[in-house]
Image (cartoon, helix red, strand yellow):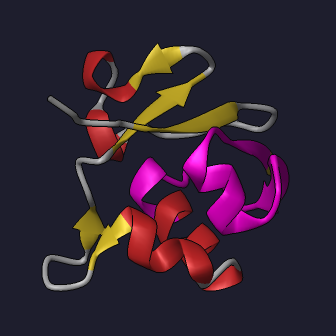
């Protein structure tokens, strides 16, 4: 199945692309997707994953078809063929 990944702001710069089509297995979760994309685009690894915990950093919002994953099943949200997953960097400041 094919899922479209979209990178916003600094994550677009790091990935080198605005959009990426990723083929993944049926029943894949967002965590599976994050692991797969960081294998395919190693430059994203440092930006998206906490190396010690092996899970996504809290510095990016992840949206599936326009819905933030906290209102879905978090990283266990299953993606379907044709879904759009958007990674939006969170900027903190004072």
Q: Residue at x 14, y 76 (%)?
A: 53
Q: Is residue 58 magenta?
A: no
Q: Quadrant of the C terminus?
A: top left
Return the residue nearer the eye: 93 or 28: 93
Q: As displayed, is residue 16 above or below residue 90? A: below
Quadrant location of residue 60? top left
**Whole-percent x and y of residue 13?**
69, 58
Q: Residue at x 34, y 36 (%)?
A: 91
Return the residue nearer the eye: 38 or 59: 59
Q: Is residue 20 left or right of residue 39?
A: right
Q: Magenta segment, which residues?
A: 3-32
Q: Residue furthest front?
A: 94
Q: Residue at x 25, y 84 (%)?
A: 51
**Residue 54 appears in the figure:** yes
Q: Is residue 28 magenta?
A: yes
**Whole-percent x and y of residue 89?**
44, 41
**Number of numbered discs visible in the structure rendering:** 0
Q: As displayed, is residue 36 above or below residue 52? A: above
Return the residue nearer the eye: 66 or 82: 66
Q: As displayed, is residue 24 above or below residue 46? A: above
**Whole-percent x and y of residue 35?**
48, 72
Q: Is residue 57 left or right of residue 26?
A: left
Q: Residue at x 46, y 49 (%)?
A: 30
Q: As displayed, is residue 32 above or below residue 2? A: below
**Residue 25 appears in the figure:** no
């Amino acid at each position: 199945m094919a899922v479209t990944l979209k990178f916003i702001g600094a994550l677009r710069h790091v990935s080198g692309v605005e959009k990426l089509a990723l083929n993944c297995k049926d029943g894949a979760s967002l965590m599976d997707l994050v692991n797969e994309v960081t294998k395919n685009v190693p430059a994203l690894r440092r930006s998206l994953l906490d190396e010690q915990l092996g899970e996504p950093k809290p510095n990016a919002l992840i949206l599936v078809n326009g819905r933030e994953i906290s209102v879905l099943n978090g990283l266990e949200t299953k993606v379907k063929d044709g879904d759009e997953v958007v990674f939006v960097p969170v900027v903190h400041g004072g």
